[in-house]
Image (tube, grey):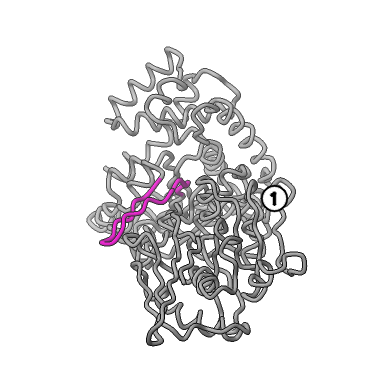
Amino acid sequence: MLAKVLSYGLSGIDGFLVSVETDIQNGLSKLDLVGLADTAVKESKDRVRSAIKNSGYSYPVDAVTINLAPADKKKEGPLYDLPIAVSVLSAQGVIDFEKIKNVIFLGELSLDGSVKKVNGILPILISARSNGYKNFIIPEENAKEASFIDGINVAAASTLKQIVEYFGNPQNSTLKKVKISNYSQIQQEELQNIIDMKNVKGQISAKRALEIAAAGGHNILMIGPPSSGKTLLAKCFPGILPDMTFEEALEVTKIHSIAGTLDSTKGIITNRPFRTPHHTATKIALAGGGKDSKPGEISLAHNGVLFLDELPEYGREFIETLRQPLEDGEITVARATQTITYPSSFILIASMNPCPCGNYGSKTQKCRCTESQIHKYLAKLSGPIMDRIDLHIEVDSVSYDDLNSKEEGESSKDIKQRVNNARGIQLKRFESTKPYCNAKMNVVQTKKFCKMTDDAKALLKNAFESMNLSARAHDRILKVARTIADLDGEEIITVGHIAEAIQYRTLDGKYFV
């Protein structure tokens, strides 16, 4: 007897329909699984056999052939366990095929028949919904994740037996229907591990630069001696970022669901990611890839922050990997079997010492490095990478008086209010095109929305020629000036806005000539 059950697979963050076909014929007892399955899928036949038997049902003793179509797409992971088991039971007549032909099944099976959670439920449901599928049965542990997708009917199962009983007698079934959660009600700022900006002593100019970076989504590089507060400032940064919209939260959650880093008790990520990989991390850990082409740190920081502490300590190849995502907001992972593009739009915060000993350019400490050592250290950062960082700021050592001052600085809450106001202006400005912030403007948008006074144009022209700026640096100065104007509530960019934006490029000449 032949039975067909629907399931779904993942290719990057996009899903594709998988048809699980089971054919039972008279013959020697065997099971053949075909359809370009990876090791985890091939092992499912043993899990399925035990799960069916331990759930109280018989397993066929005839020749069983299971096909996962389409045969030219690779199937990965244990999420096909449940649809395979349902297909086998349907082929035996235990489950009526007519009742399940429009239902998509997803889940891993334990040997005792319990249904375990799988990765990637959220992107699968979104993809399937867009293709017209509305009925799903998923693991109970994935229920919270599925509760943020409206317009579909989702049932959460804890055992295989529950599913069989549901299609036999729905009225007496213990299968749980997933209710829709309200994102606006559950969203909350979990800032217990984030230091308030008011506790940072001194560093007024650095705080100002971070406010601009948060308001416009700009990348920032902090240069200064050890113990000057660079890492502390970076850790305060998430506290002044605007709250994520529901659309942004879904984008972030999809990536973390695929990577397996999503907290199943919450089901959605409401706060912007803050990723800080160690400098010993591999290129694959940063960019993504491996045998499963999973997202890396660059993608896990999407719509959030990627913090690279002591930037020159990272390998040159590691740093150059940042080029594409910093420019395009996405990264393409190309492997022999597949090519996948992940969204990777993040704010880069990088910190570094100006030399190996850390004191080059310091006002209070003497540098012990030779000129060649300094040059070799700074040469680890290429011109193209520096061009893609909008704000370059110097963070010097904190004075004794500032360190022991009892006066608190401005709180993160107050700074965040100004950031939210500026972001609100940007969201209204880009309503028809939907970039979330000024830093993501393309060339056409930059020309359209960065209107300047004549004095501002003259100043920018003079800086472009005297500082030998690139075209990319010119555009990034304009975008930063646009953000500064938004913070001031100004529609037209003035000479003061341009002057401040240019100020954040002057360290190119001091350190990187």
Q: Which residue is mark 1?
A: 187
Q: Is residue 391 above or below residue 112?
A: above
Q: Is residue 12 left or right of residue 273?
A: left
Q: Is residue 333 magenta?
A: yes
Q: Could you tell me the amino acid type at mark 1?
A: Gln
Residue 18, position in %: x, y?
44, 60
| Of 278 and 116, the residue lying toward us | 116
- Of 26 and 213, the residue lying toward us: 26
Q: Is residue 228 visible?
A: no
Q: Look at 42% across and 73% down and name the residue there.
A: 41
* The one of 304 and 186 positioned closer to us in this rendering: 186
Q: Nearer the viewer, residue 309 or 145?
A: 145
**Start and end of the magenta stretch?**
330-348
* Residue 22 percent location from the top left of the image: 44, 70
Residue 39 at x, y = what percent?
A: 38, 76
Q: Is residue 342 magenta?
A: yes
